Amino acid sequence: MALGLRSIGQVLAVLKPEFDDISISKIRFLEAEGLISPERAPSGYRRYAESDIERLRYILDVQKNHYLPLKVIREHLDMMDRGQRPPALGGTASETPEEESIASAAEGLTPQPRPPRRAIRVTRRELLEVSGLSEAALAELEKHQLVVPRRGTIYYGRDALTVAVVARKLSAYGMDARHLRVVKQAAEREVGLIEQAIAPHLRRNPAARALPAEVMQLVLHAHAAIMRSQLSQ
C-alpha cells in the first residue's frame, strides 16, 4: 500500500470515534453518490488519502450537526474543489438553491435547471446500515408504509432512504413512526390538493408532464415557510 494511504477499514476506525453511526456501507454509498473518489489499487481495493478522510469528515459533520442534504453538501464540496469557501454554517441559514430559484422566478428571471439526481438502489441490509436504523424501527416504518421498496422490486430508493435517515434522527427527540404517520397523512392530503388543482391544466395541455413536480416543489416551499413561521411565533 502506498505511503499515507489507508484501507476502508482503517478509515472506518479513524472516523468511528467521532461519528458512531458510520459504516463501510455508508462510506461506499457516499462514494456512489460521487462525494468522494478514493484511489483504486490494481487489486480493485479502495485506498484513501488523508484528503479523502478530511473530505469524509466534513460530509459526516455537516450531516450530523447541520442536517444538510446530500445535494447541498455536493454543492459545498464543488465550491471547495474550486478553491472557494462554502457558505458559513450556523446562525441564520442562507437561502437554499431552491429558495434562490423561487426568488429569481418571482423577479421574472429564469431559474437555472438543476442536474438530474443519480438514482439510488439499496438493499434492506444496506438501508439499515446507511440510515443507522434498527431492524425493529425499520419494521415499524414499513408497517405504516412510510418506507416501502420500489414498485415491483426488493430494492429501496432515495425517498425510502431519506425517510429512514430522518426517522433515525427524529428518534432522538422522542418521535417515532406514529408521529411520521401524521406527516404521511398530511402529505397525502397535499398530494390530493395538487392533483385536484392542476387537473384542468393537464387536460388543456397533456404534454405538460413536468407540471406536477413543479407545483409540488412550490407547495413544499410554502409548507416549509409556514412551518418556520409557526415555530417562530
Image: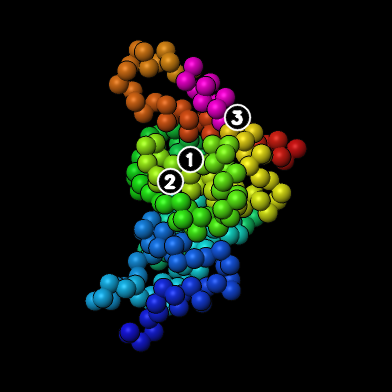
The tag earlier along the polypeptide, 3 or 2, is 2
Dots 1 and 3: beta carbons under 8 Å? no
Q: Which residue is at a point 63% across and 42% down the rendered structure image?
A: 177
Give the residues in magenta. 185-196
**Residue 182: x %, y % from top left:** 64, 33
Asked whether the residues under the numbered discs 2 and 1 touch, taking CB atoms below 8 Å apart as contact, a structural biologist would say yes
Depth order, front residue of 106/124: 124
Depth check, mark 3 against mark 2: the one in front is: 2
Percent of width and height locating residue 92 = 63, 51
Give the residue number, with chain letter if any, for mark 3: 185
Q: Which amino acid does label 2 sit on?
A: Tyr
Q: How many marks?
A: 3
Query: Which percent across, then down, holds residue 215?
Result: 46, 27
Q: Which amino acid does label 1 sit on?
A: Val
157 vs 202: above or below: below
Q: Is residue 74 above or below residue 219?
A: below
Q: Residue at x 40, y 63 (%)?
A: 28
Residue 2 located within the stretch drawn in magenta: no
Between marks 1 and 3, how big is the CA–CA gap? 16 Å
Q: Which residue is drawn at 35% across and 87% down?
A: 3
Q: Quadrant of residue 178?
A: top right
In the image, 23 versus 137, the foreground residue is: 137
Q: Residue furthest left?
A: 42
For label 2, the residue is 156
Picture coordinates of residue 193, whole percent (x, y): 53, 21
Q: Which amino acid type corresponds to the residue marked 3 in the rendered image?
A: Gln
Residue 200 in sight in this render: yes
Secondary structure state at the residue bearing disc 2: loop
Which mark lies nearer to you, 1 or 3? 1
Residue, far bottom: 3
Residue beneath disc 1: 148
Q: In this view, does 184 lie to the left or right of 233?
A: left
